[in-house]
Amino acid sequence: MNWLRAAEFKVGLLVIVVGSLIAVMSMQVSEDPSYLGRSKKAWFLLPNAGGLVKNSAIRSAGIPVGVIKDIRLQDGQARVDITVKSDVPLTTSAGIEIKAQGILGDSHVEVYPGSPTDPPLPDNAQILNVKAGGSLENLVQQVGEVTSSLKAVAKNLEQATSENGTRNHILGRIVKNVETITQDLAQMTTENKDKVGDIVNDVQDITTSLREVMNDNSDTGLKKTWARLAETMKNLDEITGKINRGEGTIGKLISDEATAEKVDSAIDGLNNMVGAASSIETAFDFRTDYLGEVGNWKTTVGVRIQPGLDRYYYLAVVDDPVGLVETTRFQYSGAPPQNSGDYYEKKTYENKLKFTLLFAKNFWDLTLKGGVIENGGGFGVDYYFFRRKMKATVEAFDFTRTNLRGNISYFFYRGLYLNAGWNDAFNKNDASSSYIGAGLLLTNDDLKLLLTKGL
């Protein structure tokens, strides 16, 4: 083991140790995270990679996190391959921004890891979110564009303010118009100097009158009026204070919840009553029929009150020409009567006012009604068809001498209708007769229209 003590062995061992230390220190100092396998690779495309240098540092939030591994041409653009530390959480929404570094044109790559909720970026994948800017070249280009705009503005100002270009530019026309206005004002004030002096005198008189009003100490003066106004405001303040404290009727109404609830309840009841009244529909029915067998006219004037769509009340006054029927028997002259053929009868009809009061219930196109019909108890049925333009009616009343009546009504224009039927079909009242006539039914809407046009 004498070779272990030899000077050559010791010198060689020292060289190996020192070299290892230098290698380890170099890896620690280097910004390239690819040493020892602790890295992640990616790449992106740039239209211009000017200012970027291979092996230069890549930063994230100003902190070096990797290096540029390679810069080469791909499809007419610069492809930049980068290597970052494995603890930088690159995701699919990661972004790249080229930022200027100093005023000499150098640039560096700024890495934005992306949203932590997005999937991780695969190794050696392309970063699509790239923003190139901030270089000295871009700044010089923008300065050039601003300079060109300033030149154009200066040229337009020069042309607008020149004598020949005044009317060719809007700014020149504005300047010319302002000059014209000032000249007109100067001329007007010169020509109307006396009037301007009169205006100044009038203003002075007004200010003098105002001063006198302000200094007037009479009962009608401004000071006394102001004092009374202040007293009135004080009284109003006291009244509002009492209201806020709940004093008096108005105060209780505002502050006392029980009183306010009672008032609200009363108002709701009144609103319901008014609403119900306004929803009632009223219709007026005027009708006249000619009784063929009687040879006279029968007239009916009625009112229909409908509080809802499913029901209504009907009240009518009827002038019936066959209200009273008297039959007189006369004997033929000659031999004594042997049988009924020896006599003849004569009917006498007299007018009579009758009243009708009905309650009706609607079932779609069918209506059932009952009550008093022409002074006798009775009931009836109405049925609408042809889109409610035609109505068929059957009524039976005065059951001691049952009067059965059938009727057809046709509504053809704005409440006007035609009427036809047969009265006293069984001739129990000696008043059997066909009839035909017409009528007019006016509803609330019709009356409003007529009143509006009349006004």
Image: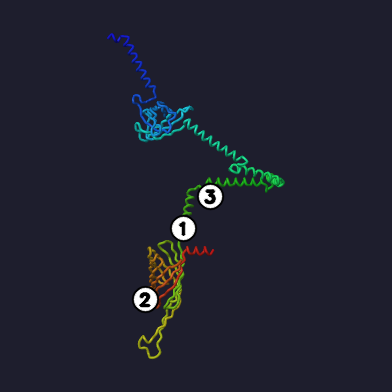
* Percent position of residue 134, x then y: 47, 31
Q: Nearer the viewer, mark 1 or mark 3?
A: 1
Contact (Cβ within 8 Å) of mark 1 with mark 2: no
Label 2 packing within 10 angstroms: few (<14), some (14-19), many (20+):
some
The correct choice, above or below, for 332 with respect to 72 in the image is below
Alpha carbon separation for disc pair 3 and 2? 72 Å
Label 2 belongs to which residue?
426
Q: Position of residue 330 (x, y in %)?
A: 41, 85
Q: Quadrant of residue 408?
A: bottom left
Quadrant position of residue 84: top left
Quadrant of the image containing the N terminus: top left
Element on which disc 3 rests = helix
Which residue is the site of mark 1?
275
| Label 3 vs 2, first from the N-terminus | 3
Which amino acid is tagged 2?
Phe
Q: Which residue is mark 3?
A: 250
- Nearer the N terminus, badge 1 or badge 3? 3
User: Which quarter of the rendering shows the C terminus?
Assistant: bottom right
